[in-house]
Amino acid sequence: MDDETIRWYDRHARSRSRRYEDITLSEVHRYLHMWIPPDSRVLEIGCGSGRDAAFLASVGHEVTALDASAGMTDQARKLHPGISFLHAPVPLPSDHQLLQESFHGIVSLAVLMHIPNEELFDFAYQVKRLLKYQGVFICSYCIRREMPEDERLFVLRTPQEVRLLFEQLGFSLIDQRISEDAESRPVSWVLQTYRLETKAVHWGIDAVESVMNRDRKTATYKLALLRSLCDIAQHRRVHGTWLDEHRVAVPLGLAAEQWICYYWPLVESSLELPEIKTKQLSFRNQLGQLISYYRGQGGLHSFYAQYLSGKLPREAGVLAASAAGSIARAIVNGPVRYAGNRAYGLFQYSGSTSLKYCGSPEELISRLGVIIMPGDIWRELTLMGHWIQDAVILRWAELSRKITSNRVDLSRILALLLISPEQQRNAVPVRRIYEQQRELYCVWTGKRITNQLAVDHVIPFSLWHNNDLWNLLPSDSRINNAKRDKIVTRTKLDQSRELMVRYWNMLYAHDPQRFSQEAQRTLLGAGRFQENVWEQQLYHAVCESVEITALRRSLLRWPDDTG
């Protein structure tokens, strides 16, 4: 929880407690009574004066309540003796004894807006860890606040944004209510109840199917757009921005970048694919010029490595901008405009479709506009995108074969579509950096590396195809062989945090431009690499990506499955 916010509540603990105790919240208390089963074991996070914990105890629940403010906890103990009040940080430290317990219900009223973005996933993950199967989580937070600012942190998040976070962790939303402030202040609140499920929540994918199956297709553009949106939702979801409860915006530049990678092997190929070899591919000439520039210089893989590190030669940057701009216009004038039906288009667009120079991912993202889509589609792509993406690639190959009147073998088309600029593990440059150090310690054991050095992908390459610097850390080869393609447990990440940060700083010092750009592009979002706090930001972002990847795919964990 934000430190300034905690200090504010410490300073105002007595006056705030009196104020809270004087407010009548009968509607909220009836709501809690309705959703929490009788005789439950309940945890309240952010208990304030203890008012709501006292109500829960009065109707027969066994209540444990905690608050991050020592001042508020002291007031709660004085006002409501007999209830177990704890002073503890929110989220809890990974070794906190409370994390070994479990509850039928967890209540957290007026807390989420005080939690910084980098700690929100940890908070949600701990709620999941503390709840029993089919347990309920009830939370409230402000979604509008038009009041003079004080020292407290207020992050206004949309209900859809919070809902998506909890759905990714296996919760389902079972009730939601929006109301005005009980004290008649210019504040609006949302009250949500979630249930922890054992099965993944399945959402209707009619809109996605309409693009993949029912829409009329004479070219592969709509499938390419879906594929790129799946990739963004799976591996760069931080770039998705909720505009309101129903719409999400993603950078057009990220989609254009993916299209360069998708169509490069097709344009370069000798296969006779009509939609590639004719004027149907509106950006063929511009992309062809970029391909010609890199012919004999490593092709797509060389271009992509230079682009990611922000080290494109001037001429290549001009050619990349021309190709990306032409692709951006093809996206906007094609699938964005025509996906869906005449009565209701699935996508919208805002911003520019051209740029003069593109030297890095940050420039491509910032200088092109955004694709706007329904929140339900973004949710589906986020939850199930790795399955949808596989289906899209297969249907793309089938459509291309159909356009050739079945003259080209399906396997040959699929082979081209599966080419990735990061198709191979490439840890050689990072290995050289590590080999220059006098002493190296295995990131996962903390012991000096005396066996052969291995450069390990924190998130396995087989899952993410990611050779970013932050993802490449030194490991003892025996440990690396034991881990292989498993996902490290959260316990192991917490134990290894100090070494992870140490090696990140080493890699950052070696190439700050590449390191920061890769971290922003994949995990943090454009412009969010802050010099004084980036280690904390990056660590929390890695933990979030590790957990979500493991949960979505039901993956084995390392060193065991108990983390």
Image (cartoon, rainbow, N blue to C red):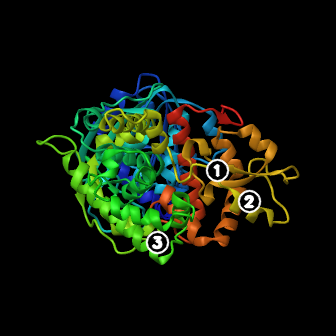
What type is the residue that disc 1 sits on? Arg
The picture places residue 54, in percent across and down from the top left corner, at: 44, 37
The picture places residue 494, in percent across and down from the top left corner, at: 67, 48
What type is the residue that disc 2 sits on? Arg
Apparent side of residue 97 relative to residue 50 in the rendered image (left or right): right
The label number, if any, that marks residue 316 in the structure image: 3
Using the numbered discs, state the Cα–Cα distance from disc 3 to disc 1 in whole angstroms: 25 Å
Using the numbered discs, state the Cα–Cα distance from disc 1 to disc 2 in whole angstroms: 12 Å
The picture places residue 335, in percent across and down from the top left corner, at: 25, 48
Question: Which one is in front in this view, the residue at disc 3 or the one at disc 1?
Answer: 3
Please give the residue where the numbered disc 1 appears in the rendered image: 425
In front here: 465 or 539? 465
Please give the residue where the numbered disc 2 appears in the rendered image: 431
Secondary structure state at the residue bearing disc 1: loop
Is residue 55 visible to the viewer in this orientation of the structure?
A: no
Quarter of the picture containing the C terminus is: top right
